[in-house]
Amino acid sequence: MNNIICACGHENPEGTVLCGNCGRPLTKEAKDLKLADMRYEGSARRSQTYNKSIIDKIWNFFSSVKIGVTIIIMILVAAAIGTILPQVLYVPASTEADIAAYYERVYGTFGKIYYELGLSDLYGSWWFQTLIGMLGISLIVASLDRFIPLYNSLKKQRTRRHESFMKRQRLFALGESVGQETLTKSEAKLKELRYDVKREDGALLAEKGRFSRWGPYVNHVGLIIFLFGVMLRALPGFYVDETMWIREGETRAIPEAPGYYLESKDFILETYDKEQADEVFGDAIERVGTIASNYQTDVVLYKKPESALPGQTENLEEVKKESIQVNKPLKFDGFAVYQMDFRLDELKTMHFVLSNKATGESLGDLAIDLVNPETTYDLGNGSSVKLLGYYPDFSGFENGEPQTKSPVPNNPAFLVRMTTPETPKGETSFVAIKQTVEPLGENAYKLEFQNVDTRDVSGLTIRKDKTLWILALGGLIFMIGVAQGSYFNHRRIWIHETKDGQFAVAAHTNKNWFAIKKELDQVTEAAQLPLYKDQQDSESQELKKDGEKSS
Amino acid sequence: MTLVSISGNLLFVAFICYLIATLFFGGAVKGSKPETSDSEKRWGRIGIIVTIVGFIANLAYFITRWIAAGHAPVSNLFEFTTAFGMMVVGAFILIYFIYRTPSLGLFALPIAIIIIGFASMFPRDINPLIPALKSYWLTVHVITAALGEAILAISAVAGLIYLLKNVDVTKRSKQSFWLEAVMFTLVLTLGFVASTTTFSVMDYEAKFSYVDKEQKDQEITYNTPPIFGMNEYKALTPGTMTPLAEMPPLVNAKKLTTVTWSLLFGVVLYGLIRLIIRKPIAAVLKPFAQKANSQLMDEIGYRAVSIGFPVFTLGALIFAMIWAQEAWSRFWGWDPKEVWALITWLFYAAFLHLRLSRGWHGEKSAWLAVIGFIIIMFNLIAVNLIIAGLHSYA
């Protein structure tokens, strides 16, 4: 490696733009610039020093901000495309075929193409995830590539800089100082302005807010931690995402939460009442119609005692009673249970009367529990009803066999054998809501439908997420870094006496030039320094000249 | 007078104050004297005082509505957009006291006026909160996000001033074309306000029945003459205009009609303006930007992004994720509004990297700031009205 030896004698690694010691421009380009490029203090970055091995090439690729920004823009555009049509997650279809059909039916040819290109599951696609991964690598490499040399050169910086460095700063002055003890007065004023001041024979360096330069690297660390947390979620066991439907009065094991049971006491749906709503909400309710105010499931959480055998659900210990509402999940042992959905008035029990068709005489009534029906109902007086078949969600006959669509009691139907003292052999009947079929000929008795009991069902989501604290930590570090970098500025002011007794003043800040100018104004006045010029702002120079002419 | 009507009147007072303040800021930057001369300073001072009076009235609107509703008034499109407009003014006042530049007020206030005017085209009733919104995170998340967006909007205002000053609008170029396109877009917003107001003054109403994309029968009420009809529509109000074309079930023809009317009004309005002034709008506005210092506008643009970006991140992403975890059981679900918040964030991240590492200052930076504002407005308007998702509360 060829070191560059500066005129001041300092050895700089290859790729250095401004000498680490005196600040002289070292490259031809840097010498041609009117204003020095102060990014990363003109220090040599690894990406500019090595370009031989494959690792160097990969490193150089990912260290480029141009590449980083390109990746950001690609993610941005892809993310936008993903919002044109709803993603699969939000589509009311579950099987691949249904989903494909849904996109074509609802969104036409465009929907079909969108689905077939895989844009309907864009955020889960391998190429989108690859882009996120590349962004992560770029964050790490670009940060290291810049942070280390920047840190070193700020740590080692000299008080006296070469004239060629000074005159290439945006704020620069060279001239006589009319006052006495210029440097001492400057130092006092700068200290008053909370600068750290270093002095070396005839030269002064005032600096403040250097830590704001670390802001970008701190926030990148936060982002990397966040992305790491997101990546962990791809591994099994880091989070639980289950749903459960629970009926009022039921006690069920909580999926993926061993030993925990939940009992639903009540599901409550409340709406804003137009009569009771004051004049404030009246108009809105009139315009929109019914507005829900609360979805709530009152639950009791139980834990199985340590000593209990597997499968044994007696003697559950009550942990707590709580009302789960939207925005108020039930939390226990790292789990959270959310109120997500509901079904009102699911059929619970059906009441029938066994009666004589001719006389209408009743032989007693029975109530069938639609979740756990019994096989035989003894009516006491020598009559009984036996359930031969139960079809909770009856959908019609196929080859003479009754069918059920689902195990949910939406439309219950029964195949029963009715036995009475009069008909000891029994009569077979098929009973559904508003429908009776007598498959084996005319019966003397019938099972007459009386009424139903209903209950509500709550749809709950169970979550446990072991990565949350990593994500929260990443977010926190990001916010600290971004505040550090955004709300503080790194300001430096150099003053030195030249050989011919003049004073050179230069100032640099990473941002907010407006504020450093104000401070430099104060120092200039206090120490009677030569008036500085903003070498980048041609407009106010012209304005000043105009002002001078007219006055 | 009820609290609700007091609140409405306060908003109107704020609106009028902003209009008057704009005129004073106009006075401060016209004429040949530099912005810093005494007479110009006086105009600027009156301008900022009237702005502050308006802002106090605006805050009073916000607080009285909050008290009346019992929740932060940021729960529907009218409330959110109005709050956003108010915060743009707040952010302007903050930046004004750092940089003391009236030019910024001359452009920031009209933008806020358009935003508030646009907001008042949506139903202004106070909604009771649906269960999903019943959380203190509504207050925290929405207000922080709106504040971040408002500060970012100031960078677009500074960018616009920079461009008006530095783009040569007398020559045909890409820059002058796109600058005029931005002006045209602002006029289109006025077109929306004009068309909605016209038809609401006329009390226009036309009811239709139609079949939606799930093959269900629905009813819909148009408040503008129906140019487009819904799928298999049948008119229920006699004597109204017959739609010119029927739309497939996927397209919400009512919204399409509203957009078309806004475009028609906007184009006619723009045409009239051009007929009267006989040159591009940008050319007329250019002299008003002439006093601004380009270097200062560039710095304000960057400063606004560097102040607004962390606030936006906190409000629109971090608080949003915490609330989403609490309400929807997951911190991130690729809902369109979430995605567009991420897009906005990525865009400003790219902006900062291009500026800091690739030296995109001046004109490039100004264009980026304007594009950023367009993305914010897209997220506010299009994502709520066109792309349906979990956030479509309005």
Image (tube, rainbow, N blue to C red):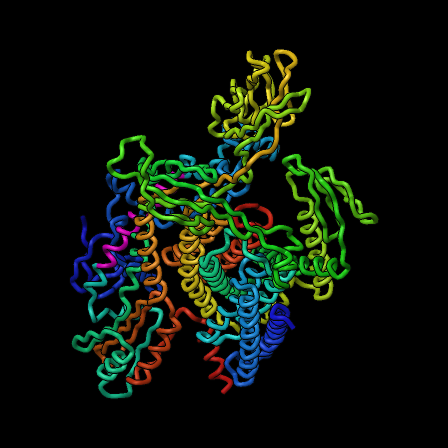
Q: Position of residue A99 (x, y in %)?
A: 53, 30
Q: Position of residue B340 (x, y in %)?
A: 49, 49
Query: Of A420 and A336, which appears nearest the observer?
Result: A420
Residue B6 in the figure: left or right of residue A127? right
**Is A37 contained in the magenta span?**
no
* Residue found at x 60% / y 35%: A107
* Residue found at x 29% / y 48%: A140
Residue A42 in the figure: left or right of residue B287? left
Count the numbered circles shown: 0
Measured along the vertical axis of the image, is residue B268 above or below residue A22? above
Residue furthest right in the image: B239
Q: Position of residue B35 (x, y in %)?
A: 52, 78
Residue A539 visible in the current orientation = yes
Q: Position of residue B316 (x, y in %)?
A: 45, 55
Q: What are the residue bounds of the magenta stretch?
A: A129-151
Query: Of A489 and A407, which appears nearest the observer?
Result: A407
* Residue found at x 20% / y 68%: A158
Measured along the vertical axis of the image, is residue A139 above or below residue B78? above
Residue B387 in the figure: left or right of residue B225? left
Which image quadrant for residue A253?
A: top left
Our reading of the magenta stretch's main secondary structure is helix
Residue A54 in the figure: left or right of residue A271? left
Which image quadrant for residue A338?
A: top left
Measured along the vertical axis of the image, is residue B235 above or below residue B142? above
* Residue found at x 54% / y 79%: B49
Residue B15 visible in the current orientation = no
**Is A140 contained in the magenta span?**
yes
Query: Of A134 and B311, which appears nearest the observer?
Result: B311
